[in-house]
Amino acid sequence: MRNNKLFMIIAIVIVALFFISVIKDFAVKISVEQGVELVTGLKLSMRTFNAGIIRTIVKITDLKLFNPASFKDRTMIDMPLIYVDYDLPRILGGNIHLRNVSLDLKEFTVVKNEKGELNLNSLRVAQKGKAAEAKKEGKPLAFKIDKLHLKIGKAVYKDYSGGGMPSTREFNVNIDEVYTDIDNPQALVSLIVVKALM
């Protein structure tokens, strides 16, 4: 009888922990999607978002950053996998410290629409606004990536400015490189964009 009660208590605790984990991941996933949209003005979606607390690992699958509505092509960035090993005590202390980051960027699509506007400009506007906001708020958070493993599959350029069907060019980038000691989020974004568009 005592064993049955103990088993029931353990089962309830396991089920409760499972639901807490699922709810936590879902809540963080929604927060990240909304946060990126607020900062960049662009919609983001992820198929799965799993964040560990005991094991300080974040795993994101099928991340897509979408173009603004004025572009026919829906997706700007397609990342099948993002893996992050983070330093929880440093983050709780106000410093963004990521020990190990792995980015698998399958496809980066640059689009020029009928008006001659580039989809990348929407990112630049957001970054300028963000930089100005950070200056107003004072000193930004400390940021550090110890090791970044960057994979980029291909870059696609589509030009709709001539009317009708777009002229399309595909470039197999096939980058698989490791970088260390990245201490600036803008440098990280620039590195990805420059490497994809080289």
Image: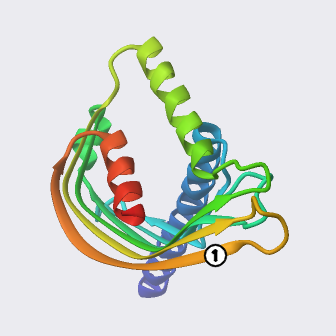
Position of 197 compared to 94: left or right?
Answer: right
- Report helix, strand or loop for mark 1: strand
Q: Quadrant of residue 39?
A: top right
Q: Quadrant of residue 165?
A: bottom right
56 or 11: which is nearer to us? 56
**Residue drawn 50% across and 35% down?**
127
13 or 178: which is nearer to us? 178
Position of 177 compared to 69: left or right?
Answer: left
Which residue occupies the extreme front position in the image?
162
* Percent position of residue 43, x then y: 68, 53
* Percent position of residue 121, x then y: 59, 44
Where's the C terminus, which quadrant?
A: bottom left
Local packing at callout 1 (Cα closer than 10 Å; few below 14, some 14-19, many 20+) is few
Give the answer, above or below, for where 5 lies relative to 30.
below
**Residue drawn 22% across and 41% down?**
183
Q: Amino acid at mark 1?
A: Thr
**Residue drawn 53% across and 62% down?**
25
* Percent position of residue 195, x then y: 34, 62
Position of 68 compared to 136: left or right?
Answer: right
Judge whether residue 62 can be spotted in this image. Answer: no
Residue identified by numbered label 1: 168
Which residue occupies the extreme right position in the image?
164
Give the answer, above or below, for where 85 lies relative to 140.
below
Judge whether residue 47 can be spotted in this image. Answer: yes
**Residue drawn 57% across and 58% down?**
29
147 or 153: which is nearer to us? 153
Position of 136 compared to 101: left or right?
Answer: right
* Percent position of residue 63, x then y: 55, 68
Q: How is the image coloured?
A: rainbow
